[in-house]
Image (cartoon, rainbow, N blue to C red):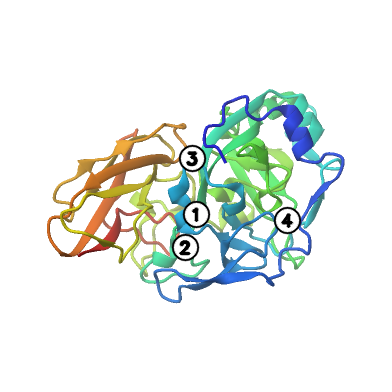
Amino acid sequence: MSEHLGPGAMSRRRFLQATGLAGSACLVGGVSALDAQAGSVHLPFANGMRDLTRAFPQKGEMILLRTRPPMLETPFDVFDRGVFTPNDRFFVRWHLGYMPTQVDADAFRLAVRGQVGKPLSLSLRQLMTEFEPFEIAAVNQCSGNSRGFFQPRVPGGQWANGAMGCARWTGVRLKDVLDRAGVNAGAVQVRFNGMDSGNLQATPDFLKSLDIEHARDGEVMLAYGMNGEALPLLNGFPLRLVVPGWYSTYWVKMLNDIEVLDKADDNYWMAKAYLIPDTPHANAAPGQTGFKSVPINRLVPRSFITNLRDGDKVVAGHAVAIRGIAFGGDAGVRKVLWSSDGGARWLDAELEADHGRYAFRRWNARFTPAKRGDMELMVKVINSDGVEQPVEPNWNGGGFMRNVVERTKLVVA
């Protein structure tokens, strides 16, 4: 897959063909069949043994956390292959027990309703042909990415660092759709709903909301394309919300309902779930109470070494190449710094092409280890707002927003 997809790389005709508007997208056999195991992997934390699977349609080899609703992690070596994460290796996270395993693209309709002058019912073809196409490169990262590294351990999906990915998203601006409907004066928020649902009637529907100004900022979008192809069904086909610079809990998949509200949304998934401490780095001590909580929101900057792993051997006196990825969270990457002496001295890495403020940025460096023994490499990013990764990891009871200077331990022979 090419990393260099120009603005015209995804024509409307191509998407009309790719999405099969005369038929449907489906997961043959559903998403629970596990008859094609591909081995196992041990993630670097307690109880980290995981199956590798190829059993999920439209997906290559993935790390299996859960079958239903599916949670699939991207193997970390995939991130060493380029800025854009291939669709068939892009992580998967669903919240509710039922998701359609087949979607008729011809019959699909997006409702736009609530505090609008003209309620809409839009087909996928209308979205593709009646609105100006929009494209943006952006990181989609689960709020609980890296939760398995939290100490003390916290409940929830025990991800390593692979619950993230970067794609070039194609679709239409949410602002343009809302403008066609005509937002009423006094509108406060916009709420989004998808086609998934709970197995029990009492399960709260998965609903997420954005403030009206954010929803209409010209970057929030309705995506029908991903890296030059139609969205995989497990990643939200036929339509998903893309909220650049924000955690993926807001990136509602299989989006089919938009409601403009005249008051703040108090549904379960906004008022009780995905709350973080309103503190620097969303940090709270274990057992701490009394702090204000707010809905999770903006991504924070992160960086990783992708070509070396803990325990890898290098040779004293020989140059070693280091490379990796970084992203600035809700801002661009200003610089990536690395250290081989415990952080006493930080050196600038060379940055590769800039694909936009919300995308991964590749970086490179070289060093020559002087003597044999154990050593540790460290990496951190500083974003365009001057925000950098902390030396000590944050902690909170939800296991959200882990961020810390990343370290890789090597053996110098």
Kind of residue indicated by mark 4: Asp
Q: Is 27 in front, or is 390?
A: 27
Q: Earlier in the sequence, mark 4 or mark 1?
A: 1
Residue shown at 37% from the left, 61% from the top: 395
Query: Mark 2 = which residue?
Result: 398
Name the mark on residue 196: 4
Q: Position of residue 133 (x, y in %)?
A: 67, 26
Measure the C-alpha gap from mark 2 to mark 4. Answer: 23 Å
* Crowd around label 4: few <14 · some 14–19 · many ≥20 (10 Å): many
Query: Mark 1 = which residue?
Result: 143
Residue 279 at least partly seen: no
Q: Earlier in the sequence, mark 2 or mark 4?
A: 4
Instruction: Give the quadrant of the C terminus.
Output: bottom left
Measure the C-alpha gap from mark 2 to mark 1. Answer: 9 Å
Kind of residue indicated by mark 2: Gly
Residue 70 at least partly seen: yes
Q: Earlier in the sequence, mark 1 or mark 3?
A: 1
Query: Mark 3 = which residue?
Result: 245
Kind of residue indicated by mark 3: Gly
